[in-house]
Image (cartoon, grey):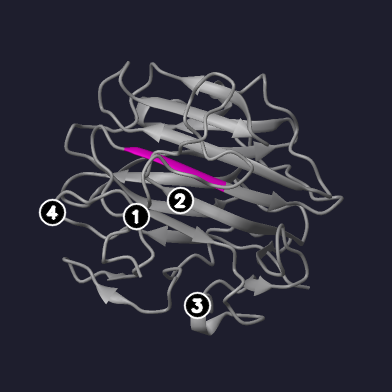
Amino acid sequence: MKHITSIFLVALFYSSQVSAWTKTFDWEDYPDDSRNTLGLNAFKYTKVSRERAHNSNASLEMGIQTGQDGWNEFGATFDLPPAKVDGPNGERLVPMSLPDIKEGDELWYRIWYYFPEGFDFSTDSSQGLKISRLRTASSGGQFEASVGLLIDSGGITIGNEVESKLPSTERNSQGVQVPRGEWHAIEHYLKFSSVSGKGVRRVWQNGKLIFEDKQSATLETSTSIAAQMFLFTYWNGGAPKSQICYLDDMVFTTDRPSNTDSHGNPYLGIGNVQFVAPPNPPSSIE
């Protein structure tokens, strides 16, 4: 059986201001069972698959085995595209990365998920399954905190370690249970600020705004950066059973979308992705 393990997108560090950029993944251009060519060989149960797809023919399949926490097998970069480069401190990093996101910057990302019937979100803790999170770092590259999203049997949980709030204390009472057996879009927006009242976070399920926070800081200090993006990095205990899920039509962008939700907020939405200005990815992202 193929299974889900942790996967992450590691950020390159830049000293100069980075222009807005957009990166998308529909997985169509990658061969079946892509693993070594994508740098996925360290992720034993992650591969490009054509078993299911949101649109077209391919998606990213991820799996976990009974009792695994998703972190013990964590240990390599997620190469997209498959070409490594050296970081300023000798790190082995990858071009598909988040250029430094700093004080005042914005990020939108949307992922379509498919959890098969019977998929079990239960964990050994009250926090939930970490499905995506941004790790923030000091200007010197030292890890500071994580800001992310989790899923449990009740729905989506919001985590913000910058504010020292456990995800369980940030329960989103408006969100609906994440469904099984169908594709489901989860979008997350962050405006990064170390000042309470200037940071912003919003979450949408299938295009409906379910969470907004305009009070909490999203960076530790004014010189902190959002340095790494992780997907499915920790189960908060051992997985209850061996199971798989699929991710597709992933969009990561600092370009302001031209789509707006029913409250007038810019968002990617569930249809075609459009922007106020044409995307202009930096040369470091291939």
Q: How many marks overall?
A: 4
> Is 221 drawn above or below residue 213 in the view shown?
below
| Visible residue check, residue 256 | yes
Label 4 vs 1, first from the N-terminus: 4
Report crowding for label 1: few under 14, some 14 to 19, many 20 or more residues within 10 A (C-alpha): many
User: From this viewpoint, which residue is outermost toward the right?
Assistant: 117
Give the percent coordinates (x, y) of residue 174: 67, 20
Q: Quadrant of residue 83?
A: bottom left
SS for dot 1: loop
For image coordinates 74% across by 38% down, the residue present is 178
Q: CA distance from mark 3 to mark 4?
A: 28 Å
SS for dot 3: helix
**Residue hosting label 4:** 15
Q: Which disc is residue 98 wearing? A: 1
Q: CA distance from mark 1 to mark 3?
A: 17 Å
Q: Which residues are magenta?
A: 106-110
Give the percent coordinates (x, y) of residue 91: 25, 69
> Is 155 drawn above or below residue 180 in the view shown?
above
**Residue hosting label 3:** 38
Three-letter residue code for mark 1: Leu
Label 2 vs 4, first from the N-terminus: 4
Three-letter residue code for mark 2: Phe
Q: CA distance from mark 1 to mark 2?
A: 9 Å
